[in-house]
Image: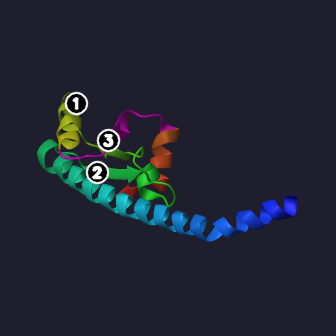
């Protein structure tokens, strides 16, 4: 019985592999679109809200899954606290992706170090 089950399973392997390649390609396309939106958000933050530095981090800059539940994580430096919510709203309006905006100057040091180490300056 186990032999019959394993034989049936091998019949599905080509379809499983094809589906996996299609999912990976979709993740790459979605990540590329998200990175483009992240760059646009960085430009808005610098030009309209005087941010000195913007860093993308998290799943948008790593290989692997980036599906419809994935968002864009951005860290910002030099954004006046009084403008934080207005700036966040402005970049959300320009993106179909959810965006998390982290103030580098007010986040825990260990989190900042991780962002600096793993992030992508925009």
Q: Residue at x 24, y 51 (%)?
A: 42
Quadrant of res 122 = bottom left
In front here: 60 or 12?
12
Residue 85 image label: 1
Q: SS class of the residue under badge 1?
A: helix
> Disc 3, disc 2: CB below 8 Å?
no
Residue lying at the far left in this picture: please name it. 48
Label 2 neighbourhood size at 10 Å, few (<14), some (14-19), many (20+)?
A: some
Q: SS class of the residue under badge 3?
A: loop
Residue 12 position, x and y percent, is 65, 65
Say if the magenta span includes residue 107. Answer: yes
Quadrant of res 73 = top left
Q: SS class of the residue under badge 2?
A: strand
> Mark 1, mark 3: which one is toward the viewer?
3
Residue 98 position, x and y percent, is 32, 41
- Residue wearing tag 2: 53
The answer to whether residue 80 is seen in the rendering is no
Residue 98 image label: 3
């Amino acid at each position: 019985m186990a032999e019959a089950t394993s034989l049936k399973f091998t019949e599905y392997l080509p379809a499983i592999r094809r589906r996996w390649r299609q999912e990976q390609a979709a993740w790459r396309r979605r990540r590329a679109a998200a990175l483009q939106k992240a760059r646009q958000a960085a430009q808005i933050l610098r030009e309209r809200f005087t941010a000195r530095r913007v860093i993308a981090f998290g799943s948008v800059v790593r290989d692997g899954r980036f599906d419809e539940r994935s968002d864009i994580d951005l860290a910002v430096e030099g954004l006046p606290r009084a403008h934080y919510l207005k700036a966040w709203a402005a970049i959300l309006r320009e993106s179909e992706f959810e965006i998390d905006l982290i103030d580098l100057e007010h986040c825990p040091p260990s989190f900042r170090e991780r962002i600096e180490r793993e992030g992508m300056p925009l």
